[in-house]
């Protein structure tokens, strides 16, 4: 049975013997050391950026084969390290999007979940995942201002999964028999034009239909939902016989960090449902991006114990003014794999009324293998997933290690860094506008012009479609140039930061912008000059290529 012993060497020991432990730790050490050796803070990649030829993936397909005989673990580690070559890494120069460097507590939690292989489905199989889940749901419930005794929640597959789950709840609350009978064909959902596309996919998948997702206008200055437009569109739907069932409140828009007014939305929804004798409309705060800022709900800005500078304090107070109403929503979510500093996938959905999950639950007889026993009393048969990874353990570790204060420090630093970046950008370029300057937060969206900035005019609908398109094209050229150099400084960009009216047509036009998303703990106010210098060089390059007089 020597062969079987070889196979056993592929597993951790069953008795904790030191020999086996040393072997395992040496492999982990090798992995960490070799990845570390690829690091360079002046770059945004591990090792060299891999340029991919057009047939790159084709050649992978041609050459990929499962080996008939397994290779040595040391060789496996080498291969894993080579996978990481050219991989983006969140150094100080990494400012493309909310993809954090996984923190050490987050990694330790994730490793624990993997070592135990803890399945969140049922506490008999995954007691660690189940217990951590109940703990983190309670912790976050308290932070948003829910009553932790009646709220509930679980970890799911991202902000997208939270939107999907909340939509299922919204349907079940108004139509408890929809599970058996299917849904009526006159249901409607509402979300801002700046909402994440998660809801679009969810209305498709639930069978509501994407033409029943009503897009509500947003204010181009602060990118928050226009409440009058919400009111008018909801009323129009109702008058025509539709039933509004769900509103997504984008609380921290992915690109602009615009924050919808959840309290105002709730008031409008209640007023309309009362007027027309309808059931209450479900509100999900899509706080995947912004939810972590609720750690400031209880911060004493007057005493200011963490000594935040005046402008940082002002920014944080402005964010809190909106975030403090998250608890008005029926559910909220937290993408810990964005501003919560844990590895993928770790998202938590928390609902105000935990009883609601019963509406989605299966009958005991429908889950014959799990749950229905005298032992074990945490069985999440209401989730769309069956087995669930124990990402709550990673979230738990991060919440413990950072504490509220640690999160306050890192989230405030994003505001600080963005404030400084905006000032330096505007001081250094006469041809740029910050298009989310009313939104303090972790992101800055900015747009270059061939001459002086025309953002105010664009915002107010005073530019023609052609003029806006030309500026969009100019920015696209800049995206290409900046993107080609992303191994040095990794900016983001988006072709639809927001929509604006145009003067000459009954149309709206998308706005293209470059995006600076400060996510690395190593991006500080001292590192901002690098970004400005980099932008100078890239813009000059584009202007030279295009024969445009420098606007600097
Ligand atoms: C990122 C994001 C999502 C999607 O979250 P995933 O974790 O990628 O599924 C949904 N809504 C908002 C506002 C987001 O920023």
Image: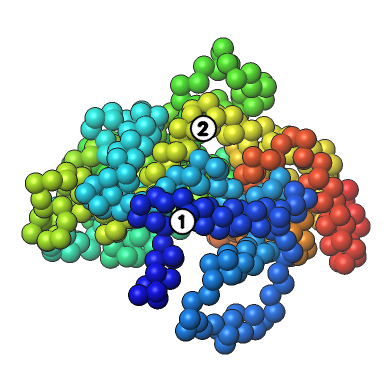
Residue 348: give x, y in percent of width and height. 38, 45
Question: Left or right: 230 with respect to 521?
Answer: left
Ligand 1 neighbours mark 2 (CB distance < 8 Å): no
Q: Residue at x 52, y 57 (%)?
A: 23
Vertically, is 205 above or below 263?
A: below
Question: Left or right: 183 with respect to 233?
Answer: left
Label 2 environment density (alpha carbons within 10 Å; few <14, some 14–19, many ≥20): some
Q: Residue at x 51, y 32 (%)?
A: 402
Residue 150: give x, y in percent of width and height. 23, 33
Tell me if label 2 and label 1 are in contact, CB under 8 Å: no
Q: Secondary structure at mark 2?
A: helix
Q: Is residue 273 visible?
A: no
> Residue 456's image quarter?
top right
Vertically, is 153 above or below 493?
A: above
Q: Pick out the residue farthest to the top.
A: 303
> Residue 528's image quarter?
top right
Vertically, is 241 above or below 107?
A: below
User: Nearest the camera: 548 or 407?
Assistant: 407
Vertically, is 235 above or below 262?
A: below
Residue carrying label 1: 20
């Amino acid at each position: 049975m020597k062969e079987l012993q070889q196979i056993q060497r592929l597993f951790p020991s069953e008795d904790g013997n030191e020999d086996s432990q040393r072997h395992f730790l040496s492999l982990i050490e090798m992995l960490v050391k070799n990845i570390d050796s690829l690091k360079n803070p002046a770059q945004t990649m591990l090792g060299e950026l891999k340029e991919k030829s057009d047939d790159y993936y084709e050649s992978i397909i041609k050459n990929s084969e499962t080996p008939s005989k397994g290779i040595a673990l040391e060789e496996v580690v080498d291969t894993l390290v080579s996978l990481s070559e050219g991989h983006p890494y969140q150094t100080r120069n990494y400012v493309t999007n909310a993809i954090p460097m996984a923190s050490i507590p987050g990694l330790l939690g994730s490793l624990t979940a993997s070592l135990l292989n803890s399945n969140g489905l049922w506490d008999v199989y995954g007691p660690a995942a189940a217990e951590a889940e109940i703990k983190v749901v309670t912790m976050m419930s308290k932070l948003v201002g829910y009553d932790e005794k009646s709220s509930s929640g679980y970890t799911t597959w991202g902000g997208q999964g939270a939107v999907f789950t909340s939509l299922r709840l919204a349907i079940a609350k108004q139509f408890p028999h929809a599970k058996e009978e299917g849904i009526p064909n006159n249901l409607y959902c509402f979300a801002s034009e700046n909402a994440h596309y998660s809801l679009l996919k969810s209305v498709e998948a639930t069978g509501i239909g994407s033409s029943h997702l009503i897009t509500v206008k947003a204010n181009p200055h602060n990118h928050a939902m226009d409440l009058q437009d919400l009111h008018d569109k909801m009323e129009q739907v109702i008058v025509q016989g539709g039933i509004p069932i769900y509103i997504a409140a984008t609380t921290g828009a992915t690109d602009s960090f615009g924050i919808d007014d959840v309290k105002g939305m709730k008031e409008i929804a209640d007023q309309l449902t009362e007027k027309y004798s309808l059931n209450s409309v479900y509100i999900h705060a899509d706080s995947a991006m912004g939810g972590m800022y609720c750690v400031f709900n209880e911060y004493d800005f007057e005493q200011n114990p963490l000594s935040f500078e005046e402008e940082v304090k002002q920014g944080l107070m402005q964010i809190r003014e909106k975030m403090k109403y998250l608890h008005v929503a029926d559910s909220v979510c937290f993408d810990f794999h964005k501003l919560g500093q844990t590895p993928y996938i770790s998202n938590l959905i928390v609902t105000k009324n935990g009883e609601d999950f019963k509406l989605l639950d299966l009958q005991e007889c429908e889950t014959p293998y799990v749950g229905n026993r005298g032992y074990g009393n945490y069985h999440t048969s209401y989730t769309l997933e069956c087995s669930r990874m124990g990402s709550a353990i990673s979230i738990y570790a991060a919440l413990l290690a950072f504490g509220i204060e640690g999160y306050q420090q890192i989230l405030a630093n994003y505001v600080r860094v963005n404030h400084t970046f905006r000032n330096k950008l505007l001081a250094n370029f006469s041809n740029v506008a910050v298009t989310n300057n009313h939104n303090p937060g972790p992101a800055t969206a900015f747009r270059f012009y061939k001459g002086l900035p025309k953002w105010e005019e664009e915002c107010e609908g005073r530019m023609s479609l052609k003029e806006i398109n030309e500026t969009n094209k100019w920015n696209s050229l800049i995206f290409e140039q900046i993107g080609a150099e992303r191994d040095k400084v990794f900016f983001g960009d988006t072709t639809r930061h927001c929509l604006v009216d145009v003067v000459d047509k009954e149309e709206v036009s998308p706005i293209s912008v470059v995006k600076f998303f400060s996510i690395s703990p190593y991006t500080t106010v001292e590192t901002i000059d690098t970004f400005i210098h980099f932008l100078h060089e890239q813009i000059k390059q584009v202007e030279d290529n295009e024969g445009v007089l420098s606007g600097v």
